Amino acid sequence: MDETIKICIQEINPHVVCSLCGGYFIDATTITECLHTFCKSCIVKYLMSCKHCPQCQLKVHETHPLFLLRPDRTLQDIVYKLIPNLFENEELRREEFNKSRGMAVDKKPGTKKEEPTVPKLSSIINNPDGHLYRNDEQICLCLERYRPQRIMHHGKVLTLRALDRKFLRCSIRVLVSHLKAMLFKKLAIPSDVQIEVICDREMLSDEVSMKQIFLMNWFGKETPMVLYYRFRETSDNSVT
């Protein structure tokens, strides 16, 4: 039987706290020469006036110090997984920051949405050479049919098909609602039929992003992240 080991958060703080601001890493960024890590905004601001590592004093590139910075997304994912509500709080701060400057932000569930600022998945599927977005972290997905299904729809049998191309790469900001919109289009599903998207046996809300699903359901597993889709049974139809 596996033994559960409890670790005090203070024991791991030296590995997940930025020495410049004293807070947990946000957009963890590493200096490639010495492998010390800081918050992205902290180290960029620091290197504007100093040309050495704040921890070991190693001299960084004299004229272009930012060339030696690399995002550490694995470490950032670990920090978000370890620290409760850190990811959600950071998303909220960024939303408030964007609002204060009149920039576009995602609407809350239940309100009318504006045109999404994230890339449309239909364009990713139809144009595989044009799916790389420079400013977005990408995630690889596999969209699998949960199982063969049929429903009666207006007196006709509607069969749930498998996607011809089930692998795709998209922005971590893509929402489940965007995936559903793509499935409706690619599989020619009538708009009055409901579908569900599932990860690790959990039905996903339309407002959940790929980043949140990865952190909560897929962290530590092999890529691609596998999502399943199926018809939702309602009072108007019976799934077989």
Image: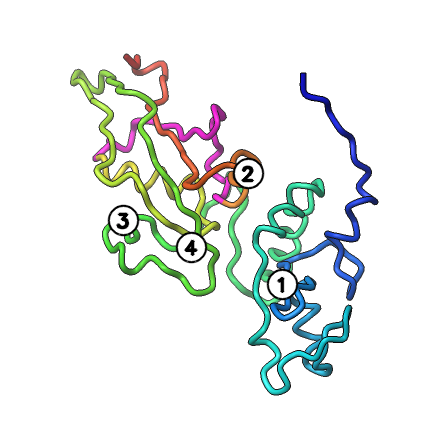
Q: Nearer the viewer, mark 3 or mark 2?
A: 2
Q: Residue at x 70, y 68 (%)?
A: 42
Query: Which label number is shown at residue 217?
Result: none
102 over 195 or under it: above or below: below
93 over 112 or under it: above or below: below
Indicate whether residue 206 is drawn in magenta.
yes
Q: For the residue marked with disc 3, what is the amino acid?
A: Ile
Q: Residue at x 51, y 51 (%)?
A: 106
Label 3 element class = helix
Q: Residue at x 41, y 34 (%)?
A: 226
Labels 1 and 2: the sequence-earlier one: 1
Question: Which residue has dot 2 on it?
Answer: 220
For the record, the magenta segment spans 188-210
Label 2 element class = loop
Q: Position of residue 136 (x, y in %)?
A: 47, 59
Query: Which label number is shown at residue 125?
Result: 3
Question: Which residue has dot 1 on it?
Answer: 29
Q: Position of residue 216 (x, y in %)?
A: 57, 36
